[in-house]
Amino acid sequence: MEHEAWMRRCLQLARNGAGHTAPNPMVGAVLVRDGRILAEGWHRRHGGPHAEVECLNAFGEGPVPEDAVMYVSLEPCSHQGLTPPCADLLVARRVRHVVIGCIDPNPKVAGHGVARLRDAGIDVATGVLEDECRWVNRRFITAMEQGRPYVILKWARSSDGLLDRHPRTARTVQRISCFTSNVLVHRWRSEEQAILAGSRTVVNDDPRLDVRHVAGRSPLRVVLDRHGATPQVSHVYDGGSPTLLFTGMERPGLNAEQVILDATADPLPAMMQELHTRKIRSVLVEGGGGLLSHCIRAGLWDEAREIVGTVLLQQGTAAPRLDVPPVRSFTSGDDRVHLYTRRAALPGDWPW
């Protein structure tokens, strides 16, 4: 139980890196002796020091006590990347006891970090709160184990189950959710690497697909437009943040990087492969009913987040339906938010 308490602190620290560490994982580390924290740290940003380095830097240059225990939520790396191997640092600093949450599935690590520590005579325990540690890094782990980004579906629907009202009178977003929920959505956007919308959404709503209501970086804007329907003056092509366009035809003069799709094939597998190649670990899908339903039918989703507003639309596009119950629901201003996952259960608390 003592191990679990300190590992939970590692997970709290790891979440501080949300929206900043990708494509790297989020990791927390705590150095403990006699029930007291000597130092702690977390991976703050991609390319920066890893959690173990931050923790030992916070501890200082002095010798690490022989009975101190280093807790870390993910296996220390054993290879040279943008930073030196953390396993080598732990050996050099003569840390004698290490407790690890879960093994790193990256083939460059995948048990080699543990082996490096044990070969140096370090006492190593693994698998402490393993499910929770894997859940925090579900985006990274999905990329490593399944070779694709982690896919999160998001939509807002009216109280009578519609995404929008027909007929439309203007090319603008039809507001369903309250401002509190809009702020929540922008926080969600800031935590993912990419945001995806289809051509119908761009044509009808002209969304910006960026982060404005919270502090944080805007995700890569991804547009699926196989038939060249999206107007050049759309906000997604305004240059405010990068846009990646998947299309069946080249469109000269458009302010977006373009990837040409096979017009006869299902676009989703090719898109996911391209994004994975670019080290995009997660995609928030804010498409219309067609794109969302396509993802659901293809089984290409890991989470879904549904916001239910109080407005009645009476006629329009039906919202997607999932064949699983929500794992959690909560109130956001005047709205209700339902959270779904393809997992049978969630480990520990879902951190929102």
Image: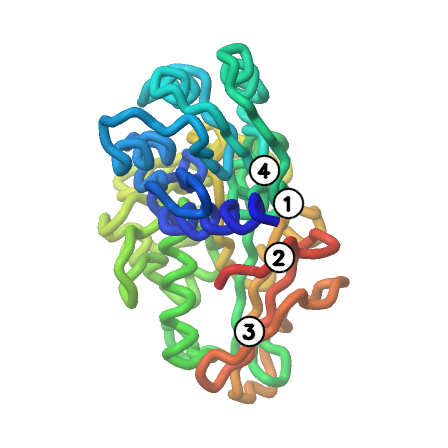
What number is the disc on residue 348?
A: 2
The percent position of residue 160, horizontal first and vertical second, equals: 63, 84
Q: Secondary structure at mark 3?
A: strand
Mark before the other along the chain sequence, 2 or 4: 4
The residue that mark 4 highlights is: 142
Q: Residues within 10 Å of mark 3 (few under 14, many from 20)?
A: some
Q: Secondary structure at mark 2?
A: loop
Mark before the other along the chain sequence, 3 or 1: 1
Measured in 3D between alpha carbons, the distance from the residue under mark 3 to the one under mark 1, in whole angstroms, is: 24 Å
Measured in 3D between alpha carbons, the distance from the residue under mark 4 to the one under mark 1, in whole angstroms, is: 14 Å
Which residue is found at the position 29% from the left and 44% from the top? Answer: 242
Whether residue 221 can be seen here: no
Which residue is found at the position 29% from the left and 64% from the top? Answer: 214
What number is the disc on residue 131?
A: 1
Measured in 3D between alpha carbons, the distance from the residue under mark 3 to the one under mark 4, in whole angstroms, is: 25 Å
Q: Residue 271 or 210: which is nearer the viewer? A: 210
Label 3 is placed on what type of residue? Val
Mark before the other along the chain sequence, 2 or 3: 3
Q: Disc 3, disc 1: CB below 8 Å?
A: no
The percent position of residue 48, horizontal first and vertical second, equals: 28, 32
Measured in 3D between alpha carbons, the distance from the residue under mark 2 to the one under mark 4, in whole angstroms, is: 19 Å
The residue that mark 3 highlights is: 337
Whether residue 39 can be seen here: yes
Relative to 154, 91 lies left or right:
left
Label 4 is placed on what type of residue? Thr
Q: Secondary structure at mark 4?
A: helix
Label 2 is placed on what type of residue? Gly
Mark before the other along the chain sequence, 2 or 1: 1
